[in-house]
Image (spheres, rainbow, N blue to C red):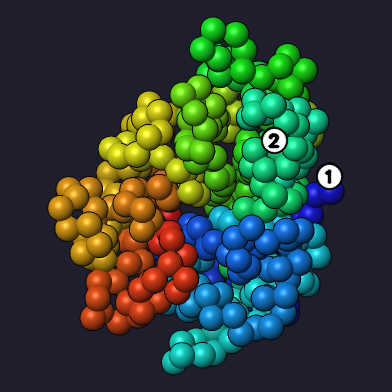
Amino acid sequence: MRTILLSTALLLSRMLFAQTNNPSELTFATYNVSMEAENYVPKGTKDISEQVLIKELASGSNPQIKNIARIIRTVRPDVILLNEFDYIADPKQGVLQFVKAYLNVDSDDQKAIDYPYYYYSTSNTGQPSPYDLDNNGKADQFGADAWGFGLYPGQYGMVLLSKYPIDTQQVRTFQHFKWKDMPSALQTKKPDNSDWYVPEAWQQFPLSSKSHWDIPIKFGAKTIHFLASHPTPPSFDGAEDRNGKRNHDEIRFWKDYISGEEGAYIYDDKGKRGALASNASFVILGDQNASPDEGNAIGAGIKSLLAHAKVNNDAAPASKGGPEHSSSNPFAKNHTAVWRMRADYVLPSRAGLKVMDSGVFWPAKGEPLAELVEKRESSSDHRLVWVKVRLD
């Protein structure tokens, strides 16, 4: 599989960057944008691929994408991870077209926003396997029999956008890290306690349903590592809970990665071993598909990450729209998805970063821009989550 790693800047962008090359305050965000092919065609449409998104990006006029761009231009994060942005190999048809046609334009009384630096790569979603991974008696290659659920390679991919330079030589990806190589991995069993996956499949099975990325970004003299992922939903399985166990271990991966010797077992896609440096500043971000309080995930995974001594989870981002959407739910102010759960996270390290403010873009009815999240088709079933930090 081919990896795309691109980081470009126009002269004007370099000039603007030079004026703010030692920033003191920055905003980081994550947003599951639902920009995958099934979002734009009727359910059950056959032979879909990333070409569907390519067409919508090329038009420059898709209403859902325009609303997503308007939300991003409103919050104006310095770095943002987009989950469920289909993998498109040619950046001119994918990430660059999104920036050019939807973000880098003045519209709706909002100023354009530019992201001269970006990162994306391949995903395990829709990568065909030869095995019957869901044990339904058929090896269908795609869907639930792909290495990560997907109808075509790269469905539900990821893209990271940045106003600041990416240290491309130091990026680490863990797409091909094998689940079996995680100590005490939660292996899936059948009712008779035999292994759910045949031995040949288990030997090849990647931990990441999409991928895990460590993307270092330079803010003047300071480097922050953006740890991006999108674990599988802990659903769409059976009593064996194979997706729940994978979700737990995908989240646990970052807990181990920031824990020094606990992450010594980890190796990246280039074969380099070891965890994140103990003194590194980092931000863990993405749709984790798990909540410490609600849902059907194995809660120990997300709870252990949120409770980690190096992670700042002192104040969960909140909104006014969440409580309005679920008035009887005590956790609603921190919900990040319309299906009523905190699923999306921006978790800064305590080292080197001081949290100044945070929020979930979910206006209540009657507030400005509430129409951007009024319906599922208006933008996404998730909400943009942001955290503002001061560099120490």
* Residue in view at x 70 percent, y 49 percent: 151
Count neighbours of disc 2 (C-alpha within 10 A) and say few if under 14, some if 14 to 19, many if 20 or more. many
Q: Tell me which label, 1 or 2, sits earlier in the chain.
A: 1
Residue type pointed to by label 1: Met
Left or right relative to 293: residue 80: right
Residue type pointed to by label 2: Asp
Front position in the image: 263 or 144: 144
Horizontal and vertical percent position of residue 248: 48, 29
* Residue in view at x 36 percent, y 66 percent: 361
Write down the quadrant of residue 163 in the picture.
bottom right
Which residue has dot 1 on it?
A: 1
Name the front one of labels 1 and 2: 2
Q: Residue furthest right?
A: 2
Write down the quadrant of residue 203 in the picture.
top right
Is residue 92 in view?
Answer: yes
* Residue in view at x 47 percent, y 37 percent: 235
* Residue in view at x 76 percent, y 58 percent: 47
